[in-house]
Amino acid sequence: MKRSCEDFFATRLPIAGLAACAARLPDGMILPHCYNRWLTPDQVRQATAHLTLAAQSLQQYQISPVRMGWIFEHLRVYLRLRPDQACLTLFMENRAEFPAVEVDSVLD
C-alpha cells in the first residue's frame, strides 16, 4: 500500500496552494510530504496522527466522519478517513483563490 500512496502523490499532487500532505496507512504508518517551509515532516506526521485520532474517537458516539475540515488563519486542513482507517490529510494555504475543485478531486 505504501507504493500505491507514493504513486498517488506523484500523479495527483501537488496542487495549487498545497503546503503539505500525509497518508496514514491502515497499519498506522504515516507518509508525510512537505511542499514548502511552513511545516516539517514531523509536524505533518504528528498533526495527522492527532486529527485521525479525533476522527476515530467520534465513532464511540455513533458519529462516523468520512471527511473533516478545519480552517485557521493561514491554513486549511482537510482529512478524508476510509473505513479501513487509512486517511489522507491535506494542509492547504488559506488563500482567496482556494482550489476547491482540485481539493475535492484529490480527497474523493
Image (spheres, rainbow, N blue to C red):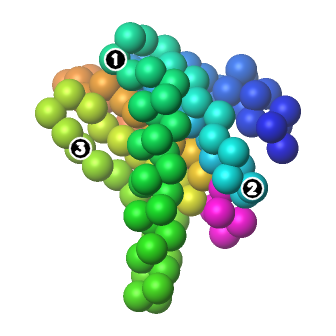
* Cα–Cα gap, marks 3 and 1: 16 Å
Q: Residue drawn at (76%, 28%), measured in percent from left and top?
A: 6
When the figure is inspected, residue 51 is found, relative to residue 48, above or below; the finding is below
Which secondary structure, mark 1? Answer: loop
Give the image quarter of residue 96: top left
Q: Residue drawn at (60%, 52%), measured in percent from left and top?
A: 87
Q: Is residue 46 left or right of residue 70?
A: right
- The amino acid type of the residue labelled 2 equals Asp
- The amino acid type of the residue labelled 1 equals Trp
Q: Residue drawn at (66%, 69%), measured in percent from left and top?
A: 83
Coordinates of residue 73 in the picture (x, y in percent) = 15, 33
Instruction: Give the number of the disc on residue 88.
Output: none
Residue 99 visible within the image: no
Q: Which residues are magenta?
A: 82-86
* Cα–Cα gap, marks 3 and 2: 28 Å
When the figure is inspected, residue 58 is found, relative to residue 50, above or below; the finding is below
Coordinates of residue 35 in the picture (x, y in percent) = 49, 15
Q: Name the foreground residue: 46 vs 83.
A: 46
**Of the image marks 1 and 2, the number of the one nearer the N terminus:** 2
Which secondary structure, mark 2? Answer: loop
Are discs 1 and 2 less than 8 Å apart at CB? no
**Of the image marks 3 and 1, the number of the one nearer the N terminus:** 1
The residue pinned by badge 3 equals 71
- Of circles 3 and 1, the one toward us is 1
The residue pinned by badge 1 equals 38
Q: Is residue 84 left or right of residue 78?
A: right
Coordinates of residue 15 in the picture (x, y in percent) = 50, 21
Q: Name the foreground residue: 88 vs 54.
A: 54
* Cα–Cα gap, marks 1 and 2: 27 Å
